[in-house]
Image (spheres, grey):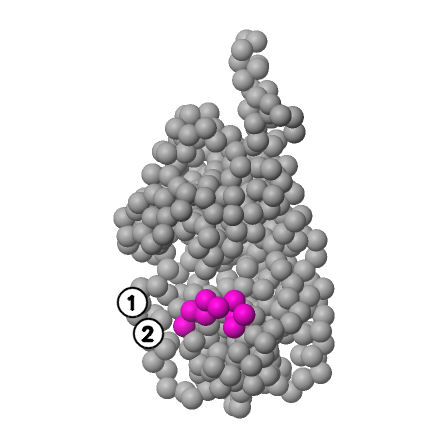
């Protein structure tokens, strides 16, 4: 880069912010954003102001803009993104990168202001049980608009790429989510919950219907397992679904709530007998990648996304969406300790280059640069015309 050349400036809109890292998108911003900064690219992240007591303008080389929002379950993300998009359109950023298909309609702003833009649409939000009626219809509408209003549509799995092509006739660029393989942890950290190595099955994720933790818990309670089922996660608001699950009377169930200490979380992954993955509607799932990276034997719901990530059974087993299927796979896993050990030994091999954070960042960097070049060419054509 010459002395006179200005570094590429990318704005990221639609996450909770940085360095708030409890969540897939926030981890994504941390991993990709920090790498982009190291490569000489200027990065600005728009943050939910109410989540941050301290509001530094810059952390680890990343610029931070704090934007207010209406603090409700349904409106916080939308209001924050709308205000962020208005702000970013009056700024001097070169590329606007948006996450979450709910923000599809806001692409009209970048289009009006001539800002190169890309959106990562995440999962099949319109099918998620938590969005019923109007919410589901909005997500379908927003996802359709995302395919039309942004310069580049991004999906994070091969199967999601196919779905957007099938449903919306919209081609997209597939860039997966990254992972960090981890080979060691402090096993004493699980003693907080009176656990021992391989004495428990594990679930990690928000306690929402989409992730089917209730189905797995139901199946586990019906099983004859002498092990425990550890459920890591919660919801940040009072919720009848989560409360009903946590009220189940069974001494084998251990609800940890959020585990924010990453060393403790690593120990829980590392030492489980098997990891249950009930996520149904997403593409590349961060919790599944963590399970692979931590060397877990994985028992996953039979979905097209989970089959893609586990390479059609090479790195895990599948169960149907029925409590009886959960009972059956628990019984099978407990009668197959050698096969479980084989899965634990080989699971990290499933983290191919596709899920490497440096490779993921390479693809985004190239995409952002190509969007800028495309805009310059379009401007030159208009001038010549």
Indicate whether residue 260 is drawn in magenta. yes
The image shows residue 364 at horizontal and vertical percentages of: 60, 41
325 lies above or below 133 = below
Q: Which of 52 and 27 is in front in this view?
A: 52
The residues colored magenta run 257-265
Indicate whether residue 36 is drawn in magenta. no
The image shows residue 288 at horizontal and vertical percentages of: 57, 64
Report whether residue 162 is seen: no
88 lies above or below 113 = below
Report whether residue 112 is seen: yes
Label 1 neighbourhood size at 10 Å, few (<14), some (14-19), many (20+)?
few
Query: Disc 2 marks which residue?
Result: 243
Query: Disc 1 marks which residue?
Result: 238
Q: What element carries label 2?
A: helix
Label whose residue precedes the other's in the sequence (2 or 1): 1
Residue occupying the point 67% across, 48% down: 359
Q: Is mark 1 on a helix, strand or loop?
A: loop
Q: Nearer the viewer, residue 246 or 64?
A: 64
Q: Do the residues labelled 2 and 1 touch (CB within 8 Å)?
A: yes
Label 2 neighbourhood size at 10 Å, few (<14), some (14-19), many (20+)?
few
Kindly report the distance in space between the C-alpha atoms of the residues bearing marks 2 and 1. 8 Å
């Amino acid at each position: 880069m010459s002395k006179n050349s200005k570094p590429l400036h990318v704005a990221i809109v639609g996450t909770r912010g940085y360095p708030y890292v409890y969540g897939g998108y926030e981890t994504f911003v941390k991993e990709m954003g920090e790498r982009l900064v190291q490569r000489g690219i200027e990065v600005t992240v728009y943050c939910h102001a109410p989540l941050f007591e301290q509001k530094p303008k810059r952390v680890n080389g990343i610029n931070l803009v704090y934007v207010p929002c209406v603090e409700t379950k349904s409106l916080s993300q939308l209001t924050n993104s709308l205000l962020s998009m208005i702000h970013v359109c009056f700024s001097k950023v070169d590329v606007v990168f948006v996450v979450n298909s709910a923000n599809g309609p806001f692409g009209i702003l970048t289009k009006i202001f001539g800002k190169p833009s890309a959106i990562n649409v995440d999962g099949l939000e319109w099918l998620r049980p938590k969005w019923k009626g109007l919410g589901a219809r909005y997500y379908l509408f927003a996802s359709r608009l995302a395919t039309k209003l942004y310069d580049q549509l991004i999906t994070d799995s091969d199967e999601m790429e196919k779905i957007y092509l099938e449903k919306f006739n919209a081609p997209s660029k597939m860039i997966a989510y990254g992972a960090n393989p981890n080979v060691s942890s402090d096993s004493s950290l699980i003693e907080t919950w009176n656990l021992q190595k391989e004495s428990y099955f594990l679930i990690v994720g928000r306690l929402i219907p989409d992730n089917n933790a209730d189905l797995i818990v139901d199946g586990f309670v019906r099983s004859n397992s002498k092990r425990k089922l550890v459920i890591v996660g919660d919801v940040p608001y009072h919720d009848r679904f989560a409360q009903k699950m946590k009220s189940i009377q069974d001494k084998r169930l251990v609800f940890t709530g959020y585990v924010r200490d990453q060393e403790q979380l690593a120990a829980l992954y590392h030492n489980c007998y098997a990891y249950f993955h009930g996520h149904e509607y997403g593409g590349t799932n961060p919790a599944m990648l963590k399970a692979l990276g931590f060397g877990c034997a994985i028992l996953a719901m039979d979905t097209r996304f989970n089959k893609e990530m586990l390479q059609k059974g090479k790195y895990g087993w599948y169960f149907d969406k029925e409590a009886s299927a959960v009972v059956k796979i628990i019984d099978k896993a407990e009668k197959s300790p050698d096969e479980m050990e084989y899965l634990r030994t080989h699971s990290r091999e499933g983290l191919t280059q596709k899920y490497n954070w440096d490779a993921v960042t390479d693809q985004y960097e190239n995409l952002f640069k190509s969007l800028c070049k495309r805009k310059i060419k379009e401007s030159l054509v208009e001038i010549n015309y």
